[in-house]
Amino acid sequence: MNKKNSMKLGIYVHIPFCVRKCVYCDFLSAPAGNDMRQAYLEALKKELACEAENYRGYEADTVFFGGGTPSLLEARELTDCLEQLRTHYRIARDAEMTLEVNPKTVTQEKLVQLRAAGINRLSIGLQSAEDEELRLLGRIHTYADFLQTYEWARAAGFDNINIDLISGIPGQTTAAWQETLEKVLRLRPEHISAYSLIVEEGTPLYEHLEEYPKLPDEECDRQMYRETKQLLEEQGYERYEISNYAREGFACRHNRIYWQRGRHHTSDYVGFGLGATSMVGCLRWKNTADMKRYLSLCHAGDIDALKEERETLSERDCMAEFMLLGLRMTCGVSAKEFYDTFRMKVEAVYGDVLKKYEKYGLLARDRDWIYLTDAGIDVSNVVLADFL
């Protein structure tokens, strides 16, 4: 297929290993020994090779190694995965290649090797610049460990770095959160992801919440959110999605595939590895989350059997996804693009919802664009749920 006619593809590779689980983490990850890691990587390579035929007409614009803690792998192991991808998939010359990194799982030498192998974006999980908050969350690093990792990354040539932060930590004050933001801003990363802590059922934090300091109340949480927006915008970071801020030209291309794919169906995404999710056309599926089953099926070459929870989205489902994901972006959704995609006016489908939240000042319209106001972002979950 001619390159200019290729569909764009986002590739996600799941590495489900970590040093230890953080108390708030509900991701599909766990500590594992070297034998398990090697068995998994062999299975992953088999999946990548076997699935390639399904994506001959695509060009991968982004590759994202997430987890878990993918930086826990040796540089050669990650390089092998990259070589497997390049062998079997068409990777754009300027593709965004992201690796999630936890401090204390890399050395300067490893970062130099990964940069040489083609990784060009790091997402470093700091979460907090306060050591007591890091200890409470179960993180394996200190703020000093993070600073060393960040210094090594810059020295290795990484000029596109995201820093992950969490607000609303038990016992956290607005002053402590502001100090974390100010410390991070002094480093001038290209991108900052600032999430409010969600206490997920089944996590150690949820099960033993009474043993932790009190969670910040709703008003405190809102204040932290407002301070985040104000401080980051003052320093030249644009909020382009509810929880994500970037300096000009550094918005995460991979995440935008998830948020904007429903808008014009020019980008699909495929996930490889344990529990990874994919969306191609109107078909969504998720790989098995059972490690033994994953290893067995990959070993047998029965890759199609990995795909569970298959769902073909109806046109109405696609419309809802267009609105739900698009409205997470601060630019909002385009009424024209909605019509071009579905041949229906957005008012004909969601007129009542739009009027309701415009009346409350939670949605606004600027010519063609419909977007959440600042007040609407504060209660975005409530607003977005009405489009289902």
Image: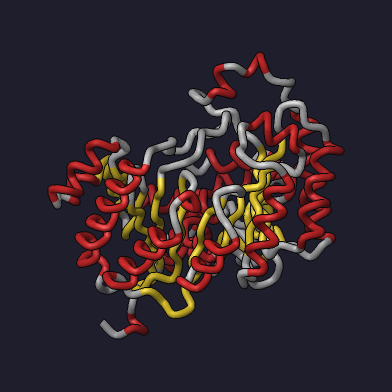
Q: Residue at 35%, 62% (x, y): give it.
A: 81
Q: Position of residue 51 (x, y in %)?
A: 23, 60
53 left or right, relative to 79:
left
Residue 342 visible to an observer of this rendering: no
- Residue 286 found in image quarter: top left
Q: Residue at 36%, 84% (x, y): give it.
A: 4
314 left or right, relative to 125:
left
Q: Position of residue 78 (x, y in %)?
A: 41, 60
Q: Which quadrant of the figure contains the N terminus?
A: bottom left
48 left or right, relative to 365:
left
Q: Position of residue 219 (x, y in %)?
A: 79, 31
323 lies above or below 31: below
Q: Position of residue 368 (x, y in %)?
A: 61, 66
338 left or right, relative to 192:
left
133 lies above or below 80: above
112 lies above or below 305: below
Question: In the rendered picture of this protein, how many numbered marks are placed on residues?
Answer: 0
286 lies above or below 133: below
Residue 247 visible to an observer of this rendering: yes
Q: Residue at 43%, 66% (x, y): give it.
A: 264
Q: Residue at 69%, 55% (x, y): give it.
A: 148
- Residue 137 found in image quarter: top right
The colour scheme applied to this rendered structure is secondary structure
Residue positioned most to the top? 210
